[in-house]
Amino acid sequence: MPINIEMPKLSDTMTEGTLIKWNKQVGDTIEIGDVIAEVETDKATMEMEAFDEGTLTSVLVAEGEKVEVGALLGVMLEEGEEPGAAAPAAQSAPAAAPAAASPESSAPAAAASQQAGATATTYANGDRIKVSPLARKIAGANGVDLTTVEGSGPSGRIVKNDVEGKSGSVPAAASGAPSALAASATALAASVKSKTQAATPAAPKAAKAPAAINPTFGGEDQEIPLTSMRRIIADRLLTSKTTIPHFYLHVEADTAPLMMLRKQVNAQAEQTHGNKYSVNDFVLRAVINAAQAVPEVNASYNGDSIVQFAKIGISVAIAVEEGLVTPVIKDAANKSMLNISQEVKGLAAKARDKKLHPSDYDGGTITVSNLGAWGIQSFDAIVNPPQAVILSIGTIVNKPVVNAKGEIVAGQRMDIGVSCDHRVVDGAVAAKFIGEVKKLIENPALMLV
């Protein structure tokens, strides 16, 4: 029987994906484990592998098209199956009616034509109709012409609420006793509606969001479509800034002892394992140790409770071409300095090569964002939900400082900031935590114990 190829759910937050590239063409034989296509999720561009074997007989989504999780991408046939069986019923075009068709046979044909109109993919002007798979199914079952429906979803997308309760005009020939197709469509609509209502509890209607203030631009300006990653970054950070009560603290740490120890450790490392430690490796170790000393920051707001995590997962902010990714060093407290340094280098390489997997993002409890490499001295980061704390690390600056004797001398200083969710972390707790980070940066030997 035909094997459907559907848009997989490749991460816990993924609701839709963009099919970047087909690696197989119609007619190609596919083996289990073959890379069928490349898909851009909300977190990374990933390879989609085949879990069945067969021959690719139908491609239903073009490269560059964005579809929801579960949407049909293509169809494969098993060995020995007829090619005509490849296309699923919802996608196949209705057969032309014979010239000498009787009035009785014309009713199903008219109903089929009405259903086909509901599955149109473009408006008359050629613009693509944005519609969810569920809404398209309900529209097809009820004979609703999608070109006449106004979408209320994101970017004008037609969702199930827009098509539920609507019905298309029924041709006169179809009046009276319902045809088999009409009866089937009615049963399908009732089934879809009952399943949807059972799965989704009724909720009060949300207030309509204020209209966005969009820019005015001309023909010489470039409009760049949002990638899935850029869209999820926008959505999550907007949610963070509008729903999480942020507060910010900063301290300045003396990094001269750290730089001296790092030089000694790297000189020794060249003769042993060959791994050179970055300043950020020491910062991560300091954050991990500080989180162990002040476990209240290793937590998350959970509506009517606060979840305090048993393990520390450090999300490391890494800049890539499409935006910012935050892969995780899992169970970081039980890893050595060498393990952490090597793992960060590996994650950064995977991020640049677009090889990160959803599992690389799981388990984060605290985020560290370091803009020191770009010469940024100080900044306030946005909390990475559902975490409660994010560290912002600035560059090391050579500047005049006053020492313990009251003398003005040359010094090396680094700004350390912390942004907190005030629902979880109070000011005193955050101050204690950032104080621990500073103490470890200024006394780096303590991190090696």
Image (cartoon, helix red, strand yellow):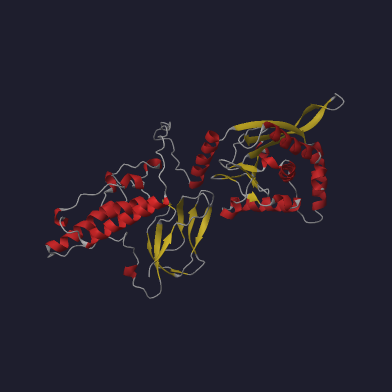
Q: Nearer the viewer, residue 259 or 5?
A: 5
* Of the pair 302 and 436, the residue shown nearer to us: 302
Whether residue 219 appears in this view of the structure is yes
Q: In this view, does 238 lie to the left or right of 311?
A: left
Position in image of residue 199 (x %, y %): 42, 52
Question: Percent from the top left, x then y, of residue 361?
Answer: 59, 50
Q: In this view, does 385 lie to the left or right of 4?
A: right
Q: Is residue 375 left or right of residue 211?
A: right
Give the residue displayed 80% in from the left and 52% down from the top: 269
Could you tell me residue 107's position as x and y percent? 17, 59
**Residue depicted at x 15% and y 55%:** 175
Q: Would you identify the image quadrant in which residue 375 lies?
A: top right
Q: Position of residue 147 (x, y in %)?
A: 28, 46
Number of callouts: 0
Asked whether residue 119 appears in the rendered view, the answer is: no
At x 78%, y 40%, the residue is: 440
Q: In this view, does 99 lie above or below 263?
A: below
Q: Can you name the residue that lies furthest to the bottom here?
A: 80
Nearest to the observer: residue 74 or residue 310:
310
Q: Residue furthest right?
A: 405
Image: 279 above or below 36: above
Q: Nearer the viewer, residue 305 or 270?
A: 305
> In what quadrant of the picture does the N terminus appear?
bottom left
